[in-house]
Amino acid sequence: MEYTVQKLAQLAGVSGRTLRYYDEIDLLKPARVNSSGYRIYGQEEVNKLQHILFYRELGLGLETIQKLISTPDFNRYETLKEHHTQLLRKRAHLDKLIENVEKTMDSEKGRITMTDKEKFEGFKDKMIEENEKKYGEEIREKYGADIINRSNQKLKGMSQEEYQKVESLSQAILTKLEKAIETGDPASDEAQEIAEMHKQWLMYWWHAYSKEAHAGLAQMYVDDDRFMKYYDTKCGKGAAEFLRDAIVIYTRK
Amino acid sequence: MEYTVQKLAQLAGVSGRTLRYYDEIDLLKPARVNSSGYRIYGQEEVNKLQHILFYRELGLGLETIQKLISTPDFNRYETLKEHHTQLLRKRAHLDKLIENVEKTMDSEKGRITMTDKEKFEGFKDKMIEENEKKYGEEIREKYGADIINRSNQKLKGMSQEEYQKVESLSQAILTKLEKAIETGDPASDEAQEIAEMHKQWLMYWWHAYSKEAHAGLAQMYVDDDRFMKYYDTKCGKGAAEFLRDAIVIYTRK
DNA sequence: CCTTGAGCTTTACGTTACGTCAAGGTGTAA
DNA sequence: TTACACCTTGACGTAACGTAAAGCTCAAGG
């Protein structure tokens, strides 16, 4: 019985490319090549392929298989033993990986559940506290005690969903800001979109929106070193200034 | 603190090439490039690299890591979970491989020790028995009891080395026969070489060689269905006839 | 006889995460 | 100035094929 590439491939359950590759690396040569250049395989090649596939199933490399089937049953057992220890090493490595991944997953899950429950509340409290410490004084001075109290109240009363929304909004602002800076133009559409998003974000915190307060806050981003650093390290040098310029232009429209 | 490629590489325990590669694929860009084209990394890059290496330790691909550290902590847990199941699949596969390799090793070991010791003897006995059952009668009839008895004696007395020699010879005959058939000419050099090899093989078994007996045995290959089938299935349709023709021509030279 | 579609060929690039030259510029200490 | 370590980019190699692309061959149907 003679087989062409596809026939043998189907018979053995491999691809035609595989057979051509095996020919190329001299692992399995066709019995002959017909006048049109077609590869023709015979019974002997079928048997040899079976052998090859058997060893391949064991995970051996083709080069090793080459030696195994060309050298008359020389060091088969030794080869298998070596392969075996390699497999064991691989499995040990995998075991470690799996363990580490599981640990990491646990800690991630822990973080999530913490965030889901008490930690979320605790986190909000801590944030208010920090805000108070960091910016409370300035904002209270500039915009009055009312605004910051209400903002704190709002944070306390926010659900997790609301909180996540506002958080993702602020994230989006940072991301877009970083890109918009590259254009260099605070009047550009992108920059103005950011200013609009910043307004949305602000309205989560303040009871009412005013262009003046928005522009004032923007100016504070540049005047106050802590705001400046925050934006500059998050989005690159000059981010605070750029944001201020964008907001100022936005509020004058 | 600023680091050049080698400095950072040593600090983090990776190669310089790795850092250049990470730069190339936009996984970790240097903070800046100095006037001579040197890559300069800062503290932020050190931290990012730590992150990257952490995930790399877990066996994640660089592309995945890329997404994990660029996307703001979005689907970290999901990614890890997916990776985890992949690792489990890999381990299951490895387990199977190991099991199969062990089985194969066992059977190899079995074969070796068996072949080395009793099995070789037992095998020879069994072969004599089979030969006796299959062909004993005919051969005894045609060539007398003497020849088959001596052949059996010879097999019993053969060392493993001798046995392997004669086995490989008979294998070689089959292989060459299959090829020679394609030429279609039993008088061809190849065919005659096969006849010569067949004579050598025969002389392993018979005490003396005679052209008549050789030609007679060849004829039997065609007359007796069992011989015929043996050669035809091993080497293709018409193999027994071809062999007979070649041998007949050989014995008449 | 011609067309069509399936099957064949070779050539060559892509895959993963770098290792390893090779050729040439840079920084610094003796 | 020279030596020597370190930097750069460019390119090939890795394992075992997958996947086009471009062109030739075969068998069957109109």
Image (cartoon, coloured by chain):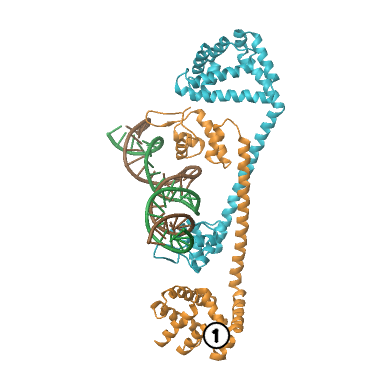
Chain colours: A cyan, B orange, C brown, D green
Q: Is residue A140 left or right of residue A182?
A: right
Residue at the image position 60 percent from the left and 32 percent from the top: B74
Q: Chain of mark 1?
A: B
For the residue pair B221 and B6, the one nearer the viewer reads as B221
In the rendering, at what x and y percent does residue C11 appear? 38, 52
In the rendering, at what x and y percent does residue B6 appear? 45, 36
Please tell me how crowded label 1 is: few (under 14), some (14-19), or many (20+) other residues with Cα within 10 Å: some
Q: Quadrant of residue A204?
A: top right
Residue at the image position 59 percent from the left and 23 percent from the top: A169
Q: Is residue A226 left or right of residue B177?
A: right
In the rendering, at what x and y percent does residue A178 appear? 50, 24
- Location of residue B155 with respect to B35 vertically, above or below: below
Residue at the image position 60 percent from the left and 38 percent from the top: B79
In the rendering, at what x and y percent does residue B27 appear? 49, 35
Q: Is residue B89 left or right of residue B19?
A: right
Q: Quadrant of residue A145?
A: top right
Residue type highlighted by circle 1: Ser
For the residue pair A200 and A47, the one nearer the viewer reads as A200
For the residue pair B221 and B175, the one nearer the viewer reads as B221
Q: Which residue is mark 1?
A: B151
- Location of residue A70 with respect to A216 vertically, above or below: below
